[in-house]
Image (cartoon, rainbow, N blue to C red):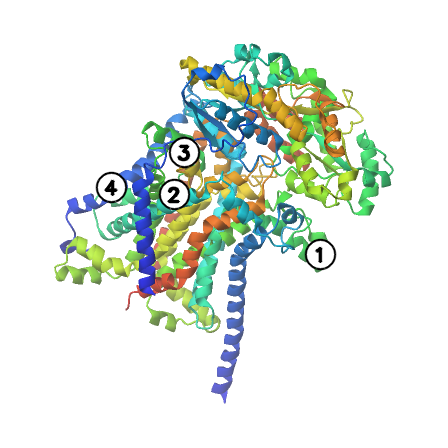
Amino acid sequence: MPESIQPKKIVIFGYMLVPMTLFIFAVFVPLVAAGVFSFFEWKGGPNKIFIGLENYITLINDEIFWTAFGNNIFLVVACIIGQIGLAFVFSLMIYSRLVKFKSIHRTFGFFPSTVSAVAVGFIWRMVFDYKNGVINWFLTAIGQEDLTRVWLNDEKIIMFVVAIPLIWQYIGYYMIIILSAMSSVSQEIFEVAELDGANGIQRAIYIIFPLIKNTLLVCLTLCIAGNMKAFDNIYVMTKGGPGYSSNVMAMYAYNISFDKSNNLGYGSAISVGIFVLSLLVIGGSQLLINRATRSKEV
Amino acid sequence: MKRKLLSVLLATAMVATLMVGCGKTETETTETETTETETEVAETETEAAGYAGELSIMHFSTSEESQGNGGSDGFRTMLSQWQAANPDITLTEEVLANAEYKTQIATYAAAGDLPDVFLLQGMNTKTWAAQGLILDLTDAVNSSPYAADYNKAYLTPFMDGDTIYGYPALTGGTCTVVVYDSAKWAEAGFDTFPTTWADVEAASAYFDEQGVDTIAFGNGGGWQANSCFISTLGNRYTGKEWYQSMIDKAGASFEDAEFVAALAETQRLFTSTSIFNEDFNAITNEDAREYYISGDAAAFIGGNWDVSYIQSTLSGTDLYNTTKFAVLPQPADATKDPNSQNIGLGYAVAVSTEVANDPAKLAAAIDLAQYLTGPEFSTFVAENYALGGFTNVANVDLSGFDQWTQDFYNWSYVDTTACEIYDSYLTGDVWGLFNTDLQTMMNGGITPEDVAKHAQEAYLANY
Amino acid sequence: MAGKSIKTNSKFANGILGFFMNAMLILFSLSCIFPLIWMFYSSLKTKREFYADVTGLPENPTFQNFIDLLSNPNNNLLSAMLNSVRTTFLSVVLIVICGYVLGYILSRINFKGNRVIYIMLLMGMLIPVHALLVPVYIVYKDLNLSNQWFTLIIPYVAFGLPIAVFLVEGYIKAIPIELEEAAAIDGSSFSKTLFSIILPVSRPILVTIAIIQTFACWNEFSFALILIKDSALQTVPPALTMFKGQFSSDFPKTMAALLITMSPIVVLYFTFSKQIIKGMVAGAVKG
């Protein structure tokens, strides 16, 4: 913004004071508290024993935690492709003159992200169910009975299986964000980039993509942040099982703190670990994107 | 259209502002809702009369839970009767469903902010006692007017050494019972349920041909294989002394050969035989019992809560009349009591140490705890549900109940021997790890020796 | 001749493409609305019927679950809904206003600390809430902030803010700066530019934020569970757990309760979806 229309510093300060104070209080005070607790052996109650970095040393050597971290990374990648990718494609389609019922698609698509994880989990368990599930029924119907399996008890594919509902549920969420960003793009540009034939799609992507790049980057950040602390959907579907094969970091921290034991000191250390790792992953992704876009521009 | 939207928004805004206005004055506390049952108010309510003021209690007997669940129904009924008998005391109730209750009570414990009276889970006893959160109730329990009728065996999960920290609450029920369709098993050639796993395996060949699962089991939550299987099967190998030694830290180990043998047998049964439904690790006990109800399985293994559900669901069908109960079959290489099943009370009414600062309040809290677990409660659940609690009541008249209820009462309290529910003891740190490993082991992903090794490490580190 | 055949060819290709695009979107939309339909007809079943066939239609549809819920003197769904309406409304209003102002400032104004604040907000999105319940509880309790009518608004606004700020920031960056320059030449003050020139242009993203946050606040569970003790102040999600037992859950009844409690926002959303979408599109910048 040019100097001439820069407002006075005091005005900016005034506008930011209240929201930022509230934000720092609500977000950082508990985090700092958790940081403090993470240096203690603490099983709940008034007695805490200071143990320095011991919880963090345990964390670094905790295979279960790193498996969970790997699962989070898998979810991040799957959801960037599945959620943002499909949301972008669907949004483009909705802008095409070949597509009907545009407003219905806009309205309905968002709906799953508003339904509680419990209900969504229930529906997808019916899809994957071994005896009465849709998938095994279909495989049997087309004569591929060999391919039927207990979908929710197969360690090798369990992460794919739990990622599908997660992706499906949030496509519409990113769709309405992308659609609102597209609404700032002039209508004429869409007419130029009209989806007719394969070239049209390509053109649309090359023309529209840069115009809403900022919003897409925000979506990317949201998606990484959301999946680094994924919890609800997986808890409902598998509780992290079988074994630890679909365990994720936030669920591990929750189990350590509440569900399976009351080891709050270590639970706090895990929370801090999640926070730091998420920061690294987001920082890393932004570096990658910056480098990629810069090298293109040169 | 725009105007319509605007007016709705305005109206919402107004309503919201109004509510903001009155929010503060709404109510400071929730008082107990019901005073409907004033008929059977006990006359022993004298001790508590000295106290007037607030008393907070937190529990998980929601009104939903109490429908059909005798323990919860009795608990709620006792609570409202006690409130009616003590009008000077304002009972502040916080009621949450069980899963949320556990999270919330752990949060309160961590913050040192427990309610006056609450339900203590067995495995938290030692930790919380060490933290000074829960009050020593040894004298109160021993000098209780009902002390002579207490079933003292139920106290062990709530003791640290000789100190008692709670009144075992709700109803005692088994965690491991085989529910089977005697008609199907007769067709397979068994008049009663087999007493050995070898016979069950033989029967499974027949049921496979019929396209029926021999036994339905659900371990999707991870805890079922522990509470409803290993806890009893382990006792068949180790005997009760071994687990007592685990509780007392008197030398027993998860790596003892007998316990590892129990794990190995479990792994064999779930991975190398066709006895159980293939999706046992992906479904919960709630799904598994549906396999039995729909006739897709010839038997089901679960806890007393499953039995009440199956009973109310099957009522009036043929299967209702042919359903019978059995103990877990005995493994070939197991040597201890083949008639055992794990039974106990998982929660106890405990009192926060804070309450001790006010003797009158403490007297009221103890009176409430004794009332919730006393003869009134036991009589109520015996007469209405054929269930037993902490206090024994003599001469329960079962004649008014049907065959199913009588059979299950006798099976639970008369015809079988009791062993411990593992996860009522020790600490959650052990069980969290153990349950997850167990699930992997039942898929064949880890050896029994490693499961035992991990559990023992966690036991040594945390208990 | 040649030209005509190309034209028919592309018409044919368009037809195929159109068919596939429509088919895909229709399938997707159907899958999205299926949960609502399924929840509705499941709520008309008895518990028994539901477990016997989870996907099947009810044989003897009954509104008994709804009747039970609304006539049960022990449930506090109605007061919970009022609490949820109040909390959600105030939180969303605050999130939209604060998010808009912060997002605008961060995207347009250079000052020391601009990036610091951006990164702090980013960090806010990375907090694993489920794992921090105990510190949260202790902090709120010690400051006497727990168990008040306004308690939940604090975390809802704080945790809703980052998403709002980022969306606004990304959106405003795409708006040509000439708008503000023209306003400045006309002598418009910062605040006037902020609220009467840029605000209308940003309407699509603000509507989107409002929708997302309305549902997020309405459905939030963890804070609502631990920070509110008094059942008169409880919001809907914790109140719904009353329909869960320790070892059994009555799903049809839970579905009925979910439907009752979701109905206000779902009805609002579907009724006004046309206007909402119009609002999103109408703000589009020309040129």
Given this view, does label 4 or label 2 mark the residue nearer the observer?
A: 2
Per the image, the residue denoted by label 3 is: C230
Per the image, the residue denoted by label 1 is: A140
Q: Are marks 4 and 2 on the same chain?
A: no
Q: Residues within 10 Å of mark 3 (few under 14, many from 20)?
A: some
Callout 3: residue from which chain? C
Residue type, mark 1 in image? Thr
Residue type, mark 4 in image? Val
Query: Residues at badges 1 and 4 in contact (C-beta under 8 Å)?
Result: no
Residue type, mark 3 in image? Asp
Q: Position of residue A161 (x, y in %)?
A: 58, 48
Q: Secondary structure at mark 1?
A: helix
Q: Are marks 3 and 1 on the same chain?
A: no
Per the image, the residue denoted by label 2 is: C83
Question: Quick check: C125 above or below B38?
Answer: below
Residue A18: mark? 4
Callout 2: residue from which chain? C
Residue at 28% in and 50% down: C97
In front: C146, or B461? C146
